[in-house]
């Protein structure tokens, strides 16, 4: 190119409005969802096996932290950050995203612990961080599990049904508290829990009314059980319309309960 032609092209580019220049491609965003579960929950369990509400486990019991990303991140590294109630976030470790776009991190906790997954980003994918989840312990070894209305809505299928398979841990002699979304205005209620009285004794059941005051708003139902002896047992709750011909087991919650000595 002749020098005069080069200068003419340069001047034309300088004079070109910014809107006429091709935009640089922005890195693709990625959403990291996360949840926790008591115990070691392996790769055979899907995202619905992990809750978004805080869980309580006996001290020293393993907790599984789950992250759902996208298969596009398979083989890439996620940073796992943790913090204590009074501490700052620190990078605890890192894990590789599996082929299905998920990641699991198992650790034993002895105090209140928050978990968060972070992706540093690269030329094609923007940096991202998950919401963050909490697991804590009590001195008595109680266990707490809750499933909120948002989770039921998220996992309810097109036929109006949802099945949750979750895990819970509690020490023998301590209590297990279970709280589930409930809405009496729909005619549904949770049926009597099914479990072995040899291992779990029902202490109380109560209906918690919504605090919003709105007509038709959802509340919750809560149960407290005494863990009687070391064992692994099950606890099943189903959500039904109790009258004859009413829908049965629209929602089902099946807990695998580990009672430790």
Image: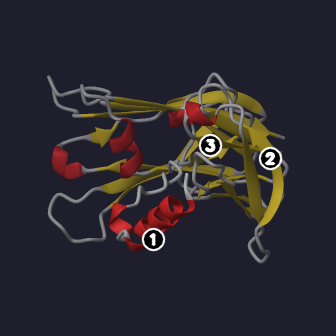
- Horizontally, residue 26 falls left or right of residue 84, namely left
Please name whichever residue, 238 or 152, is drawn nearer the observer in this view of the structure. Answer: 152
Residue that mark 2 sits on: 94
Residue at horizontal 51 percent and vertical 64 percent from the top: 4
Instruction: Indicate which label's residue lies in the foreground, 2 or 3.
Output: 2
**Residue tagged 1:** 11
Above or below, 43 against 85 in this view is above
Q: Position of residue 220 (x, y in %)?
A: 37, 54
The disc at residue 67 is: 3
Residue 255 in view: no
Q: Secondary structure at mark 2?
A: strand
Task: Report helix, strand or loop for mark 3.
Answer: strand
Q: Residues within 10 Å of mark 1 (few under 14, many from 20)?
A: few
Q: CA distance from mark 2 to mark 3?
A: 12 Å
Q: Residue furthest bottom?
A: 86
Which part of the image, by quadrant, shows the C terminus? top right
Earlier residue among tags 2 and 3: 3
């Amino acid at each position: 190119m002749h020098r005069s032609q080069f200068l003419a092209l340069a001047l034309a580019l300088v004079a070109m409005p910014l809107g006429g220049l091709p935009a640089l491609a922005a890195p693709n965003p990625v959403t990291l969802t996360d949840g926790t579960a008591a115990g070691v929950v392996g790769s055979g369990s899907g995202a619905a096996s992990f809750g978004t509400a805080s869980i309580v486990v006996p001290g020293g019991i393993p907790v599984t932290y789950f992250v759902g990303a996208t298969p596009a991140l398979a083989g890439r590294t996620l940073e796992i950050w943790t913090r204590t109630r009074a501490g700052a976030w620190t990078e605890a470790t890192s894990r590789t995203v599996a082929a299905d776009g998920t990641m699991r991190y198992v650790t034993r906790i002895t105090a209140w612990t928050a978990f968060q997954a972070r992706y540093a980003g690269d030329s094609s994918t923007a940096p991202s961080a998950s919401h963050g989840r909490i697991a804590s312990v009590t001195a008595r070894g109680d266990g707490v599990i809750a499933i909120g209305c948002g989770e039921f809505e998220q996992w309810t299928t097109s036929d109006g049904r949802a099945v949750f398979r979750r895990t819970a841990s509690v020490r023998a002699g301590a209590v297990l508290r279970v709280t589930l979304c409930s809405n009496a205005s729909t005619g549904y209620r949770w049926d009597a829990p099914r479990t072995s009285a040899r291992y779990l004794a029902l202490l109380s059941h109560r209906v918690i009314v919504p605090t919003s005051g709105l007509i038709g708003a959802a509340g919750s139902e809560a149960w407290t059980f005494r863990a009687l002896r070391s064992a692994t047992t099950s606890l099943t709750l189903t959500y039904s319309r109790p009258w004859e011909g009413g829908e049965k087991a629209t929602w089902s919650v099946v807990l695998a309960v580990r009672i430790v000595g």
